[in-house]
Image (spheres, grey):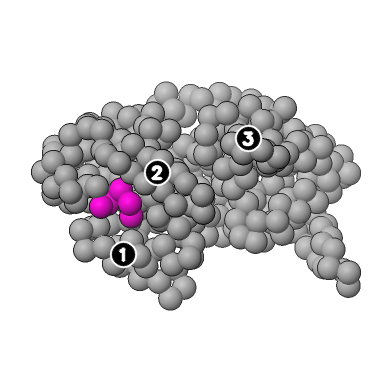
Amino acid sequence: MRDIAVFSGNAHPDLAREVCAHLGVPLSPTRISRFANDCLGVQLQANCRERDVFLIQPLVRPVQEHLVELLLMCDAARGASAARITVVMPHYSYARSDKKDAPRISIGGRLVADLLVAAGAGRVLAMTLHSPQVHGFFSVPVDHLNALRELAAHFRRYDLSHTTVVSPDLGNAKEAAAFARLVGAQVAAGAKQRFAGDRVSISSVIGDVTGRDVIVLDDEIAKGSTVLELLGKLRESGVRSVRVACTHGLFAAGALKRLSEQPDVLEIVCTNTVPVPVDGEPTEKLRVLSIAPALAEAVRRIHNGESVSALFEQS
């Protein structure tokens, strides 16, 4: 592909290299330095003039560090006369700050979107945003992908004739229903209530799960408290087996270990939108699927002016 330049920050260079391998282009080098006063500096070490520039950087821990890297990369590309700057952000962590649900609280998802546009982003390519309204926080075009096809291809290897896809809450039920259609399963959802301090309560499961194989589907798993709470309700309902799936496997604070220790959880499936933290964690039940081919195809279509939504019509 001519007239394209792909750069990555420090957040997930392995994913960036994999995307470039599918595109058949090199990953252009980026020099990130730190001044004596702790400020970051970024230099894009390849020609950007009149080129289609793609910056691959999920916002993962340390989030603020990687956000500033991304802002500086946008500014550097704009200053280098890039024809267009597309931010490829497989995980937008600030998407969880999407509403004013308490007095005097900031809507971080909108603020960070404004910062990216102010820094020079002319387009955003994202994967499975936390809620639909986040799409509208950006004043530039957003191509919003999901990983349902990749997850469905994995689970179709099993006998799904007695399977129910369960969303932990009603907010994710639409995505769970779409996934259930892809695999030919039923759908159910938990009635969840969230309290202060990340404490959650699921009062019931709406749908038929008794005696059935269950796939718990969520957009991301951080501490895993919601999934663990849901597992208790599913056990009370007498499910036959449980598999857990999500797009963003953040697995913070030992979540992967806690989920792996559940004897009725047969498998934990996520994608590589973020680097999966497996150091010292049990990985026998973990399956990590690659979304690099989907991101690469979306990048190719954006560059060539083709429809990105057509990717989902082919599902």
Q: Horizontally, is 142 left or right of 164 in the view?
A: right
Q: Position of residue 226 (x, y in %)?
A: 39, 50
- Residue 148 is marked as none
Identify the residue position indicated by label 3 in the image.
100
Q: Which residue is mark 2?
A: 218
The vertical placement of 282 against 44, above or below, is: below
Instruction: Identify the image quadrant of the N terminus.
Output: top right
Q: CA distance from mark 1 to mark 2?
A: 16 Å
Of residue 191 and residue 293, the one placed in the foreground of this image is 191
Instruction: Give the x, y percent position of residue 55.
Output: 69, 46
The residue that appears at 48% across and 65% down in the rendered structure is 253
User: Circle 2: is it few (<14), some (14-19), or many (20+) Cα within 10 Å?
Assistant: many
Q: Is 229 a magenta residue?
A: yes
The stretch in magenta equals 228-232
Q: Nearer the viewer, mark 2 or mark 3?
A: 3
Earlier-in-chain disc, 3 versus 1: 3
Which mark, residue 260? 1
Residue at horizontal 22%, vertical 32%?
207
| Marks 3/1: CA–CA distance | 35 Å
N-terminal of the pair, mark 1 or mark 2, is: 2
Q: Identify residue type, mark 1.
A: Ser
Q: Position of residue 190 (x, y in %)?
A: 31, 38
Look at label 2 and name its amino acid.
Answer: Asp
